[in-house]
Image (cartoon, helix red, strand yellow):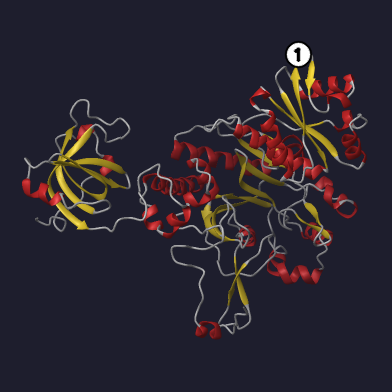
Amino acid sequence: MSEFITVKKRTHYCGAIRAEDAGKTVILMGWVQRRRDHGGVIFVDLRDREGLVQIVFNPELNPAVHQEAHKIRSEYVLAVQGKVRKRPEGMENPDLLTGGIEVMIDELEILNESKTPPFVLDAGEEISENVRLKYRYLDLRRPELQKKIILRSQTATATREYFHGQGFIEVETPFLTKSTPEGARDYLVPSRVNQGMFYALPQSPQIFKQLLMVSGFDRYYQIVKCFRDEDLRSDRQPEFTQVDVEMSFIDENDIITVMEGYMSHVFKACLGLTLKTPFPRIAYQDAIDRYGKDSPDIRFSMELKDLTDILRDSGFNLFQEVAASGGVIKAIKIEDGKKLSRKDLDGLRDYVANYGAKGLAWARVIPDGWTSPIFKFLKPMEIQQINARMEVQEGDLMVFVADKPGIVRDSLGNLRIHVAKQLGLIDPAALAFTWVTEFPLMEYSDTAKRFVSTHHPFTSPVMEDLPFLETDPGRVRARAYDLVLNGSEIGGGSIRIHSQKVQAMIFKALGLGQEEARSKFGFLLDALEYGTPPHGGIAFGFDRLIMLMTGTDSIRDVIAFPKTQKAACLLTDAPSTVSIEQLLELSLKVVQ
């Protein structure tokens, strides 16, 4: 066969050919998805990043090329030349964008052969994730995965377009920096030049972006890698990407307005969707009370209702005991509850046990009252009040949990999502954005035996709450905000402290002495003395955003080379041991 790759170049991507290209001579290059021999005529699905197209080797067109095509196998790399034609009537494939045409091949070059892959690359095949990650370079050939990575690229481009259009300046911040307390363990990097000293990989560029505001850059953004050594799950990775933003001379409403514009731009540019703005807002405590979570999924109702005042003196001993000990009694309403059998209800009881609940009571609403194991313990007036507060109708099911406030919150907050998925109550195409505001500034840590920052110690308090710093720190609200999409937090930020006086008050409330504060944050504290403007910002979890945009349930599907849940790279076998010489250079010793 003549080799034409050196003198002729690709004219089209495989997935980009359409019916209007009929009659054109094209040169294509890509991988063999599959090969089919139909009694002499050979059909091959040729694939590249834009999709696949059917190419045809007919012995009557070019016998030598047809003979060479017998060598073709799955994942061989080909260069072909041929003429586009419309497929015969009745042979079209409506599932493919190229399904109306095929390419009759008159030249072929096999650019490279391939071993039989360890798994089939066709869509829909169930493949072990460990195998996929071990052979990630093959996994990334799969069209459904390539689409996700391409959307990620498009979203990054749209991000830069939007922020540049809004007057933001992209600035890179260091990866090798100082270890500062930010809520998770740092990844530490030993210094060879400064023996016994360590850098930390940044959990976020928080301090640097505040310094950029001190420097007068006014509007900063960055698409940046961050690192956290924490327990992993489906939406966490040890190294992840943030869209990091900071602005000066603004308040919460300014940031929220700009970020709603960002979301609108990205979803329109990348998915063709128009978002309705402004997004709804809900205060943190209201979200906890109504949804049991600070990242509420508002695509369905099923809100938590507090019944403690009604059932405090009921004849059901468990309810009485819980209320008397400072606990709460809450319930959710499941409309058309007949879809859940008694066996299903037993399953719900087992489900809430995972969150510490000792039991789960239930009641079905029937024409003449309730069907419920607790019916006989309740007075008619109590049942009437519960029905009114829960706004039930005939056929509805109520489930109750009585326990400590945190256990009730976690149990019912997770149960409502579990039931909604089980009953198919969630519209998978819905996009429910929500701002959560007024987080607590501090939370009491049983481990540290003191109050700690809910976010970080540079978050500004609500000024009217400052008097509570000394008497009741847990009551102080933060000027913080999270953006939630379909029950997942995709971004969070706050207005920062720019006053030295307020910063000193916060450090005191956190139990941080002047010497300790200077040791940890001295360079920022110094900068705050040189005319710091009012400022604030936000950071979006870029990987999590792409995960939601693509409809996948794992963050690993939208990262080209992710780590496992044990923070390992199966492709490169990282982390790995290093030589004794490298350890000696760093004055380190590994203790088994």
Relative to 297, say whether 464 is above or below.
Answer: below
Q: Where on the picture, by quarter, is residue 526?
A: bottom right
**For residue 91, side relative to residue 436 (left or right):** left
**For residue 59, side relative to residue 508 (left or right):** left
The percent position of residue 384, horizontal first and vertical second, equals 84, 19
Secondary structure beneath label 1: loop
Return the residue at label 1: 367
Relative to 241, say whether 389 is above or below.
Answer: above
Is residue 292 visible to the viewer in this orientation of the structure? no
**For residue 340, side relative to residue 476 (left or right):** left
Residue at 13 percent of width and 56 percent of height: 7
Say which amino acid is labelled 1. Answer: Pro
* Residue closest to the eye, 485 or 173: 485
Crowdedness of circle 1 by 10 Å Cα count: few (<14), some, many (20+)? few
* Residue closest to the eye, 71 or 102: 71
The percent position of residue 483, horizontal first and vertical second, equals 63, 42
Q: Where on the picture, by quarter, is residue 124?
A: top left
